[in-house]
Image (tube, grey):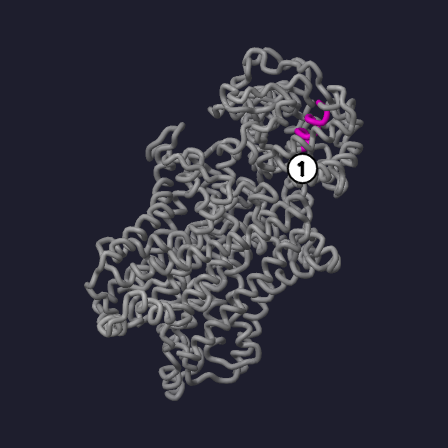
Amino acid sequence: MSTPTLAATAPGSGPAGGPGAPQRGRRRPRGVEALTPAAGLGLGVAMLWFSLLVLLPLTAVVVTALEGGWGTFVDVVAEPDTRAALLLTITEALGVAVVNVVVGTVIAWVLVRDDFPGKRVLEVVIDVPFALPTIVAGLVLLSLYGPRSPIGVNVVGTREGIFLALLFVTLPFVVRTVQPVLIELDADVEEAAASLGASPATILRRIVLPSLAPAITAGASLAFARAISEFGSLVLIAGNVPGETEVASLRILKFIEGDRYASAAAVAFILLLVSALVIATLDVVSRRVARRG
Amino acid sequence: MAESTLTRRGRRGPLTYVLRVLVLVYLLLLVAWPVSLIAQRALLPVDDPGGLGPFLERLTEPSTVYAFNLTLTVAFWAVLANTVFGVSISLLLVRYRFWGRRALSVLVDLPLSVSPVVVGLALVLAYSSTRGWFGDALGSVGVQVVFSTPGLVLATAFVSLPLVVREVVPVLEEIGTDAEQAARSLGANGRQTFWRITLPSIKWAVLYGVVLTAARSLGEFGAVKIVSQGAEFNGETATLLVQNEYGAFNEPAAYAVALVLVLISIIALVVVTYLRPKEDRA
Amino acid sequence: MSPHRTPRRTLLVGTLATSLAVTLASCASASGGGEGDDRPLYVVGFAVPEAANEAIEAKFVETPEGEGVTFSGSYGASGDQSRKVVDGADADYVHFSLEGDVTRLVEAGIVAEDWNQNETQGIVSDSVVVLVVPEGNPDDIQGWDDLTRDDVDIITPDPDSSGSARWNILGAYGHAIAAGGSEEEAAAYLTDVFANVAQWAGSGREATEAFDQGIGNVLISYENEAILARQEGKPYDYVVPDTTLLIENPGAVTVDAHPAAQDWLDFVLSEEGQTEFVRKGFRPVIDGVEGIEVEGANDPSDPFPTPENLLTIADDFGGWSAVNEKFFADGALVQQLREAASQR
């Protein structure tokens, strides 16, 4: 059985270190040592590059957002259209995370416990949304759910369209975090419970779901983080009507195009805060799981 | 050994079949059908000549060739930077103890959760020649970052930064340090240990990280859109070309380029999915 | 597991990775040498004139001045394009929707102050504001007054970034004034129109894309965009309202431009250049470009009917600085009315 965790793309879900995954890799490896001079130099260079590439530019966003003072920042964010965009983004992302919790877990279950011809193809299909360039993802959905849809469905410019695009790009996250845990979960325990007279519902509630919960949480957080930051796939699909179908990332683009960098940075700052929150939560969850395991 | 503990029993109730059908329908509607329509739109456009000939013609337009060239150049440098950085930072995170190690390991994941538009905005605010923090300094040494290739490389490296690290760290944790310590005790120096012992044992992880990084780099759109001029022969990458051609009443060309990008991603996926050695993982 | 498979797999992945690396590296070096002395002439334009400019380019390279010149075109929302040039994007020749977008470059020292001191006052192409509807005009849209109907959903670009948007809004407002309304009545009319807007697109072209995707039943746009879309086979009709606004798009050469840039601008303003504009649906800015069949126009042999009442920015609105201050500045009329409309 191959477990192609492309969700290695997902923080905390690397092959051995995944939340809830078998904790082989989590035991502190022997031989962890203090920095040698050479390693210190390496760390310095790596940190310099990381700072120039990631930390400094992101700091520039935060500083620009707050440059005009807290009041200006609040004004931008409280602008009706901006507030609506942030609200829409977060609601849609939450909805997408919830759908993924259910559908993603079911898909993972089918991949692990069921067997049928062509199952390996599904493994690739599930990762396609991750590997596809986002603008192409938009074009892809447009070809089936756009104006010249062969099935007569047109979701362009609607909130349902945004939801669909977000479902597409977040498909792999829950599947790929739950799958490895499910593989390790011994079906013998379930069978033993069944032979002792437990109903399938009880087995699901008492045995399966508790073991999967951390992985599901992790996958859902990742899907949520991805959904609030999504841009490319929405360019061709979201209607961008301020207050109705304009998401935060496209709002930022509009601010940039209108030469309003401070406003763009303010919205970007909010998104960064939410992402940081999600990452921190995820880190805590995976560490708690690691300790329990 | 792993295979026997997987325990996929043949016990199948009706629920199994219901779920199987549900999953298949969901994936068909959400992914498989729309993606396959791309091929149809690319090869048999509605109002334009279809077939392989016109398709290839659209791909060999000079501006399209330039776009792919630029995309590959940018991806090459981004992959190179992220591989070197990824392997070094993974070794540091796993093998050494230093102040801020845990914070760093969380921060390294950050780029995956930052919106591409925010990445572009951040790079502009830091490095743009007119409004960036370091714009003047860079300008005085004659370097333009935003609106030129270095900016594209930075944007692409930013968004794909954690992919190599994510692959390598777990493997490094897994293999432990016994072999390395043995090599050291037999008199190998640090460099020999790295090239002879460490690297061979993480080579798969590095390779998969590279493939993932390459796939991500070739397809980056949002961040690149902000830091690129986006003009033909001047900063227009393959993904930007897709958007521009779509807007220029030239859907067949947009779909043709999109199909190539789809094929590249699927090939990358097949490489990762089917050729990943199980030994590293079990 | 199947360790015996490893060698084959090793080989395959190794081969794939190597070939990928080699391809990337060879491409990297190939395009690295691409930056020669004969760089292209960078044309930076607003969203819709790409087809026209490319047609003119094709003619220009056949002239002695244009021999050997290559072009690189960039097209997008006028305001956004202007911002990018200020931020350092390459530009030899700019073709914007609005005068103000060139003025911004003058202030940044990128375009000379006397850029509009020529026979056409810096204008290189003309058009008028029209209403685009689906073929056959199923909703019977005849003019500006129909835009406030309940069954109408309008597509127009966003005035923050797009030039087209500003022409459209001024056209609507000008109509209300010309019909005898007071400023308050015109503002109220504009609010009604805004309340019917289904999408504020990023640019004039993105508005057309949205309309093409089936959003809305009226697209307010440039006459040339309507004609071009019809040339491209889009199933649209368009209505030239009785009262509408003359659109004047400026073009200018930058200070450190490509040596051929001035020749290019001269060619654009020549009869030959203007003829290509006309073929793509623009109205000419010089006299004597007549008798050209314009495919896609309502009447190809008389493509540009003169509206009963053709408003201009200079005569009816007191020039661009007055317009921008009154309508488009931060907190000015348009922003107020949009907020009022979104409260409904």
Q: Residue, x 24% and y 53% (percent of image)?
A: A118
Which quadrant is the C terminus of chain B positioned in? bottom left
Secondary structure mainly formed by the magenta segment? helix
Quarter where residue A191 is shown:
bottom left
Badge 1 is on which residue? C341
Would residue A89 be found to the left or right of residue C254 on screen?
left
- What kind of element bears circle 1? helix
Would residue B237 be found to the left or right of residue A174 on screen?
right
Residue extending farthest to the left is B10
**Chain under label 1?**
C
Total marks placed: 1
How far from the left and from the top, in percent, is residue C339? Answer: 69, 41
Residue C136 magenta-highlighted: no
How far from the left and from the top, in percent, is residue B229? Answer: 59, 45
Would residue B238 be found to the left or right of residue C56 on screen?
left
- Judge whether residue C262 can be spotted in this image: no
Give the vertical position of C94 relative to B175 (above or below): above
Q: How crowded is the residue under tag 1: few (<14 C-alpha within 10 Å), some, or many (20+)?
A: some
Which quadrant is the N terminus of chain B positioned in? bottom left
Q: Which residues are magenta?
A: C166-175
Give the vertical position of C40 relative to C273 (above or below): below
Quarter where residue B47 is shown:
top left
Q: Residue, x 53% and y 55% (percent of image)?
A: A228
